[in-house]
Image (cartoon, helix red, strand yellow):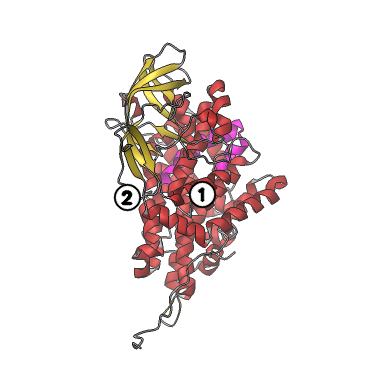
Amino acid sequence: MAASTHTVTNQVPPLVGYDVFAADRALVEAVDRHLDPELLDEAREELSALGRTSGSAQVQEWGALANENPPKLRTHDRYGNRIDEVDFHPSWHRLLGKGVSAGLTSAWSRPGGHLRRAAGFVIWTQAEAGNGCPLSMTHAAVPALRTDPALAAEWEPRLTSAIYDQELRPAAQKAGVLFGMGMTEKQGGSDVRANTTEARPLAEDGTYALTGHKWFCSAPMSDGFLVLAQAPGGLTCFLVPRVLEDGTRNVFRIQRLKDKLGNRSNASSEVEFDGTWARRVGDEGRGVRTIIEMVAATRLDCVLGSASLMRQAVAQAIHHSTYREAFGGRLLDKPLMRNVLADLALESEAATTLAMRLAAAYDDGSEQERAFLRLAVPAAKYWVTKRCTPVAVEALECLGGNGYVEESGMPRLLRESPLNSIWEGAGNVQALDVLRALQREPGALDAYLREVGRARGADHRLDGAIKNLLAELADLDGIEGRARRLVERIALVLQGSLLVRYAPPEVADAFCASRLGGDWGTAFGTLPHSLDLATVVERARPVS
């Protein structure tokens, strides 16, 4: 028998077999805080069930397999017929099916639906973020379709269904459908008014033939797509079904799948339209206004998705540090590592708390909350999504060389981390959208100031930050050139006000000292040493 050269010791057990929901104190408290008490018991049971599934060994394996086996495009069948189909690994269908059955596309039709769905989205996308894209677009298509009551009546019951049906068939023959979206083109990118896809009216009222292309069309195996095209009356929103009522395939030519940095389990494609049949959604020339509610909803999902990624990255880093020993003790107990972990935990909790506050505003639906969302969503989308990548990098480093290895799962989180900052408008687009809200919709700023004002007087650093922000808002000179700085402050002040009101004192104190009070370095792990960092880290430890 060969001699053993070493014994494996001091390796960390996998973070598996736990309740992802119950282990996230910030998320649990947000659900308790914002949801109607009459709905709490049902929601907790539902979210814990999803949390246990998300944290299970089986689902973690599904996520890894879906990522390792990206989708494949089949443009033609064996006989040369054009079919434009995308084949996915079975694990992708299992993940997507579970997300649909868990209600992640049915927020609009049940009490507290947006908050419950948001919490579920944060839980489920920690298993594999790629399936969040079709779940998000299907969810977000509902308000756009509601501009046309007939279309909404036809499609909404299937969009909000808890049944996942992957087969390509006419929508009328399916109990549940998924939606995608096609806005950007090669020449325009985020400048969708530069789109060149043409829409020619057909004999039947409200129907058109589309000719053109879409540079990014995610989840191309969906049942329907909302797209923008130039009609005689200007840029207009259209619904493009994948399969027509008579069972024939609509002209939907998938030219290629994108070879992406991350989000590899999900298919992102380039598609061509050539006489493609479509139905108008809303009036001609009102395409951006029609689709903007879908964009707003998917932007919130970008915030939720980044909060999910950050939470999983931080949970992995703290879990590793709990079990790994170095220099005579646990990493968790080393003052410098504790500072790093606490700093990461602050970023994660601030993101989760803000995201859930936005979801609660959707459920409220009042005029004031809608005005608040108009400013808060693009500001949160700008800031939270930009914080995701540095969090993922630092969390990976906490695992050392182990974190740089694919088996740890940390590289997958890192590759995914920039996506939400780019999707639905990158940083400059969000910053400019905040400026438009400030300049054109004064009610949005009033609603924002009322929200942050609820925490006034509770922390002098927050009070000072609010005062400085008001001074910046009063000075419109060179506003576009400093828009990023302004939006960053808007988001940080909002996060600080929420944490001061809702988080434990140790968390709020550390956030205000570092993010608002200026007692912070330029990298994670530079919090003031006098803070109660052990309590902050323990709160974020994934123990359920």
Comparing 317 with 59, the one in front is: 59
Q: Is residue 152 in view?
A: yes
Comparing 484 with 331, the one in front is: 331
Do the residues bearing badges 1 and 2 touch, measured as CB atoms within 8 Å?
Answer: no
Above-or-below relation of 393 to 325: above
Which residue is situated farthest in the front direction here? 79
Name the N-terminal-most of marks 1 and 2: 2
Residue 16: x and y, percent?
Answer: 51, 64
Q: Is residue 111 magenta?
A: no
Identify the image quadrant of residue 538. bottom right
SS of the residue at dot 1?
helix
Residue 278: x and y, percent?
Answer: 42, 22
Which stretch appears magenta? 359-384
| Residue indicated by mark 1 | 495
Mark carried by residue 261: 2
Comparing 436 with 101, the one in front is: 101
Would residue 501 be found to the left or right of residue 70 on screen?
right
Residue 42: x and y, percent?
Answer: 68, 49
Q: Amino acid at mark 1?
A: Gln
Would residue 444 be found to the left or right of residue 522 on screen?
right
Main SS of the magenta part reads: helix
